[in-house]
Amino acid sequence: MFLFGIVLAILGTILGLPAMRARLGIDLVQQGDILLALYLGVFLSTVLTGPVIDSFGNKVVLATSATLVTLAMLLFSAASSFAAAAAAGFALGFGGGGLNTAANALVAELYPDARGAMLNVVGMFFGFGALVVPLLAVAFSIPQLLTATTALAAVCAIAYLLLRFPPPSGDEGFSLLASIKAARHPGVLLLALLLFFQSGNESSIGGWTSTYAGAMGASPRTATIILAGYWAALMAGRMVAARALRHLSKPRLVLASGAVTAIGCAVLLASRSVTMMFAGAAITGFAHAAVYPTTLAIAADRYQRLAGTIFGFLFACGLVGGMTFPWTVGHLSQSFGLRAAMLLPMAGGAVVAGLAAVIARPAK
């Protein structure tokens, strides 16, 4: 999950730097297209890897995914055009999707009595990885950053090959369509719709906050620090969420998080100073923290036997939002300005709260 955090954060960080956009020769629309390619890779990988996990286990998926991330980082290091960057972004996302699905399915299997808390804990390491990227970008050059992340992915691939894992849990036979068939289970579509909006919110804020802060007058270094504040707050929020679940039900925690997301985005958009932009990004990150892992815990509680397949379907639906939201922000910003385009994740937070309110109602 630490490596997956790096995968999702690195493009939003380095594409927010004018030097990188100049090297690739891209505008804001093309930046949105590269982010779309990243999430398209995550989406396709997620659809495929859920059934693979249930049929063949997590080891195959984790080792293959980390190797693909290593190769994608190397490709991005050499990229000097939009086409090369988009191809690297797709490969990076395809590897990242496998890491995400396998890590969450594995934790849900290992901790059946504390899924909500433990999925938030492992999600905290996603926040660590995402936070490391903007911090390193402040201190090191883009080539140094890409070299370090490439080396880390390679080390992870080797580690996964050496570790032992639990045996596969599925007994229905391998099928690439198993994740899609998961929609037949009652309640899955509602959870999937919630993650559609949540993933869109997270990818929009993670992919555009640095660029937005720069457009509002912040220096590249300051804009990167504001983005780091978002990831740091997300990491801290998952630490708090693991404890909050002792006192709140899972659906009510998701409901509160969605409401605070809308507030945080409103602060970010209304900001006229660096301090307020940092505060808005931090509030949003803190609110985002609990939604994804807690929703997954709800799903794992209900569908224990095929967690990999169910997770694959939920991640796939969520990543449709992850693909379309940042792409939409890029295109809206060309016509209406970046501030107006960033209204999208604020509205998304309100929708998440509404869906969580439905999920929190007693089941009929």
Image: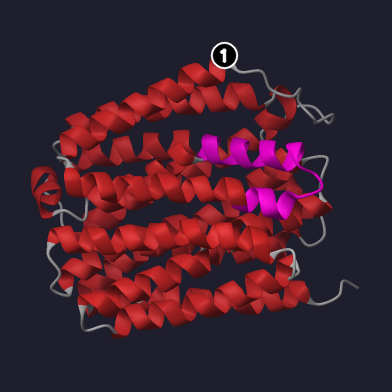
Q: Which residue, as the protein is rendered here, is positioned at the far right?
A: 364
Q: Please state the extent of the stretch shown in magenta in the rendering.
A: 97-120
Quarter holding the C terminus is: bottom right
Badge 1: residue crowd in 10 Å (few <14, some 14–19, many ≥20):
few
Q: Can residue 131 be seen in this view?
A: yes
Q: Where is residue 251 in the image (x, y as percent from the top left)?
A: 72, 69
Q: Which residue, as the protein is rendered here, is positioned at the far top?
A: 162
Of helix, strand and loop, which one carries label 1? helix
Number of callouts: 1
358 to the left or right of 273: right
- Above or below 170: residue 244: below
Residue 34 belongs to magenta span: no
- Above or below 93: residue 173: above
- Above or below 110: residue 37: below
Q: Residue at 51% of width from left, 65% of height from top?
A: 288
Residue 102 belongs to magenta span: yes
Q: Residue at 56% of width from left, 58% of height from top?
A: 238
Q: Magenta-highlighted stretch: main secondary structure?
A: helix
Q: Is residue 327 visible?
A: no
157 to the left or right of 146: right
Q: Where is residue 229 in the image (x, y as percent from the top left)?
A: 34, 62
Q: Position of residue 301 (x, y in %)?
A: 81, 52
Q: Residue at 39% of width from left, 41% of height from top?
A: 7
Q: Mark 1 points at which residue?
A: 162
Q: Residue at 80% of width from left, 31% of height from top?
A: 170
Which amino acid type is marked by label 1?
Answer: Leu
Q: Where is residue 157 in the image (x, y as percent from the top left)?
A: 47, 21
